[in-house]
Image (cartoon, rainbow, N blue to C red):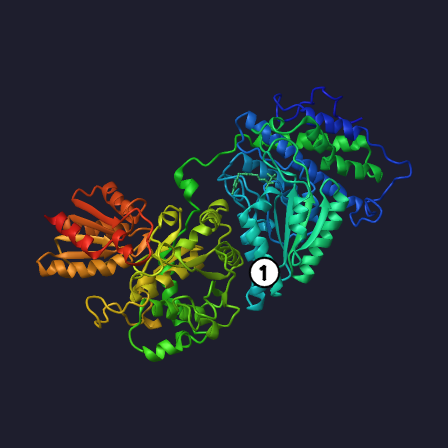
Amino acid sequence: MDSVGEAGSATPATQAGDDAPGQDLAEQRLVRAIRELTSPPEARAGPGDPIRPGSSLTVARCLDLFSAQLSSRHVDLAARWLRSRGAGYYTIGSSGHEGNAAVAAALRRTDPALLHYRSGAFYLVRAAQARPARDGVSDVLLGLMAAAAEPIAGGRHKVFGHPELHVIPQTSTIASHLPRAVGLAFSIGRAARLGLTTPWPEDSLVICSFGDASVNHSTAAGALNAAAHCAYQRLPMPLLLVCEDNGLGISVRTPPGWIEAAGSGRPLLRYFHADGADLANAYDVAVAAAQWAREKRAPAFLHLRTVRLGGHAGTDVESAYRSPAEIAADAERDPLLGSARLLVEAGALTAGQVLERYEASRTRILAVAGAMAGAPRLSSAEQVMAPIAPRRPAILAADIAARARQPVSGPGRHAADPPAMEQNPGPLTLAQAINHTLADELSRRPDMIVFGEDVGRKGGVYGVTRGLQRAFGASRVFDSPLDEQTILGLALGAGLAGMLPVPEIQYLAYLHNAADQIRGEAATLSFFSRAQYRNPMVVRIAGLAYQQGFGGHFHNDNGLAALRDIPGLVVACPARPDDAAPMLRSCLAAAELDGSVCVFLEPIALYHERDLYSEGDGGWLADYEPPERWGAAHVPLGRGRLYGTGSDLTIMTFGNGVRMCLRIARKLAADGIGTRVLDLRWLAPLPYEDLLRAAAATGTVLVADETRRTGGVSETVITTLVDAGFTGRIARVASHDSFIPLGDAAGTVLLSEAAIEDAARDLLR
Ligand SMILES: Cc1ncc(C[n+]2csc(CCOP(=O)(O)OP(=O)(O)O)c2C)c(N)n1
């Protein structure tokens, strides 16, 4: 009969070599249970027959899915074997979750999928569905070995993903991919309404899977709410949320019935329940759920009951927190046993044939794993970092000049803020310059959308987006729900769908509610996909302090450390209107052409500033450059702006500091001290060359930094100079390590002009 020996006997040698793993106790139990299965005498189903009366799953399809389930199981076993030999690194498996094969079978192969780390069988089914079909097993094995040849992350992590399979790689941060999934489902509908094409057909369904403990994460709660919020407004939200419920989050039990309670009590989220141990049931329910969500263009929640066989990962000893009875009960619900039972009871296979397939699958996968064990890994920082942030400055510059010549498809800046234009036909403030640039770019970029809290009807708390919704319509300029994770999730999905999202975070302090959507999601997508997927975006954030007593900490936050250390992130901080416009154009071009994730930090206190030295001088206003000047006025990423030619002192600063330092420079000049002021303009990438040149020009550098002394921008500027070998005099002056209080007390902790002046004079003494 089959090649599987009696329980406990040695496993036949495979091509993997003599040290190929034997069956562990769990496997032996499975083999025993399969061997006991018997077919009813009359059972003899043909390939096109239902696997069970009443099911839409045919025998032929069931056999295919069973094959994927077997492969997925043996990949898990191979992972532990490879780990034990020091040839693999990742052992979080899909064992017990293989019912998710049915979900893949119920979908189209072009439906974009954002998968849970236990959706291995789903991935293998999707790979087999692809045209041409892929060998998903190799993909996954290469991934867990961190092999450079792995097709999505190229050895940077083990993730499920492949552009040809429409599987978008996810990080391991629990639930962090749900906002993106909501954003993608939203964007597929929104793109269709705007007449834009996306990489996916218009009637696609986005599928997003996750674990049961993940449902409790506030990110998941927010995403489920956002999906329902869209559905409530009858906005298309073709989204299938699949909760693979194994009842555990590492060692913590999910209260029995909780997922049903959490997933089913929502009128706008249609709940489906399926048994992941029963392929026929899982398939039928998944087909119904997918059909419902696709046809209604509305969100569905598929609760797939699974088990977790083995510990959370290879290193986790589950017997430390689970009883033997509990573990044995889960083994009874092994989906491989369930599928074997279906096939044997239908007369499609005998128990012996099932075991032959089981063993053949093991042999094949161990052979593949063994052959790959020496696959090359990434071996230099350059290789690892290559996909983080591809930048092509010359192409960006050419594009900006060309775009200016392009015929305008929208009303242009004159439609943006008519009252302001009429009242102030002359030079603009910072807020107006951003407003007009957004309008000009919306006119030239049909794929650009602008959204956030209050940006639509109101036009932003500070009027920066005023007039844009009226001019460009509520499909392109719109108010979002009051949830920063959702705002960024919409951007993540829109970028993936090929749009150019410009989300707004109303205040810098509120970025922190959702920072992971930039840190963990947006900024890593290129890294985990070798730049095969991208989520371009320009996140406008109103921030920094000096609002003259208004607002206290949350409206005056001056902490940027959470942004500055994100690899590849562009952080722009324009101080003046004539910088804001070209810098915003550069960010949009970088996002569109290079897929860059850009933060555009707008100093609130300078939004409506008009003067520089004295009231009425208009020194902080600037003319808006017409399109024919955009090429000449282009500001590349990472280029600073130098004011003055003084040879005694260089002050390096940014944001509000620029205006303060220019005022101080004038005072110093009156005392015969020649100062030059370098506005960094870009906090990432820093203007390295400009910085070194400006320092060398005077040999004396003061860094005036409105962010906090600890973790603030001045730390990196000084370190950059020291690292580059600068040996001149150097000092810094920054805000205190404090939160910003309400009222005039704010001045006690913030960098002041007086402090800058004192520091400058001290340095030159
Ligand atoms: C935000 C976050 N917190 C903690 C972790 C560590 N962690 C990894 S998996 C896991 C449990 C997840 O359980 P569940 O969602 O039920 O998925 P399962 O592993 O059971 O399939 C935890 C806490 C994480 N990855 N992300």
Residue furthest toward the top? 9
Write the residue at 39% across / 41% down. 382
Q: Quadrant of residue 120?
A: top right
Front residue of 472/464: it is 464
The residue labelled by disc 1 is 229
Q: Mark 1 packing: few (<14 Cα in 10 Å), some, or many (20+)? A: some
Ligand 1 shown in quarter: top right
**Residue 283: x percent and y percent?**
74, 47
Visible residue check, residue 128: no
In which quadrant of the rendered image does the N terminus lie? top right
**Residue 450: x percent and y percent?**
46, 65
Per the image, label 1 sits on a secondary structure element best described as helix
Front residue of 719/617: it is 617
**Seen in the image, is 596 located left or right of residue 286?**
left
Q: Is residue 88 above or below residue 100?
A: above
Write the residue at 35% across / 58% down. 394
Residue furthest toward the left? 672
Mark 1 CB in 8 Å range of ligand 1? no
Q: Is residue 606 above or below residue 130?
A: below
Residue flagged by tag 1: what amino acid is it? His
**Residue 222: x percent and y percent?**
55, 53
**Seen in the image, is 740 located left or right of residue 209?**
left
**Residue 504: x percent and y percent?**
44, 61
**Seen in the image, is 381 located left or right of residue 226?**
left
Write the residue at 29% across / 59% down. 546
Q: Is residue 158 above or below residue 105?
A: above
**Seen in the image, is 598 located left or right of residue 632?**
right
